[in-house]
Image: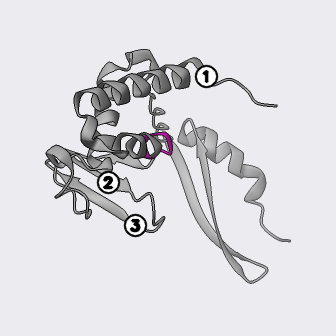
Amino acid sequence: MATSPTPDRAWFRAILAQLASKTQAKIPTLNGRVEKACKLVLAGDVALQEGNAAIVGSLSDPGLTYQLTNGTCKCRDWQQAPEHLCCHRLAVGFVRKIAELMPPEALPVPPAPLPEAPASLNFRAMVSGFEVQMTLRDTDEAALLTRLQPCSSGPT
């Protein structure tokens, strides 16, 4: 049974469709490049990087990626494509535009880093021939030492 996309995903797809339609209408000689760019975007094969760079996957070779820098792509089509708009460059442009248009509440929020424990103790031991490292953490050193008391009696 098929499920409908989440509102954010539906919005994403609708914006991508609008961008694709406008691009195709503006430059009709792109001949399938817009459709290929949409496939790359929908597959998640576009990774924006710092500055004006991106890495885009190949549609024909799953082991191949293209590095785009300042609008230049190393694929065979880039040189001959109208306005140098190969499918990889179009895909990067679509992803950048969608990111600009996406409402802030739809942007992914990175998880907050875990705070460092105020008190911790690390030790290593050999258990059945394996070296094991254990870390005990607590809110303060006194609480950590209290937890260790039952363990400190050692073997009899």
The answer to which of marks 3 and 2 sits earlier in the sequence is 2
Check disc 3 and report the residue beneath it. 64
Coloring basis for residues: one colour
| Gap in angstroms between the C-alphas marked 1 and 3 | 31 Å
Question: For residue 55, which numbered disc appears in the image?
Answer: 2
Whether residue 52 is visible to the viewer of this picture, yes or no, is no
Residue at 21% x, 51% y is: 81
Q: Is residue 62 above or below residue 13?
A: below
SS assignment for the magenta stretch, majority? helix
Q: Are marks 3 and 2 in contact (CB under 8 Å)?
A: no
Q: Which residues are magenta?
A: 40-44
* Residue 34 painted magenta: no
Q: Residues within 10 Å of mark 3 (few under 14, many from 20)?
A: few
Residue 75 disc label: none
Task: Name the side, left or right, on which 54 lies relative to 125.
Answer: left
Disc 2 and disc 1: Cα gap in Å?
A: 26 Å
Q: Secondary structure at mark 2?
A: strand
Under circle 1, the secondary element is loop
Question: In terms of depth relative to the viewer, which is nearer, 107 or 34?
Answer: 34
Figure quadrant of the N terminus: top right
Looking at this view, is 133 or 121 the one in front? 133
Q: Is any atom of residue 136 visible in this view? A: yes
Residue 14 shown left or right of residue 56 in the figure: right
Which three-letter amino acid code belongs to the residue tagged 2? Answer: Ile
Q: Earlier in the sequence, mark 1 or mark 3?
A: 1
Expressed as whole percent of the image width and height from the top left, the position of residue 75 reads: 26, 62
Residue 6, disc:
1
Q: Which of disc 1 and disc 2 is earlier in sequence?
A: 1
Q: Amino acid at mark 1?
A: Thr
Structural distance between the alpha carbons of marks 3 and 2: 10 Å
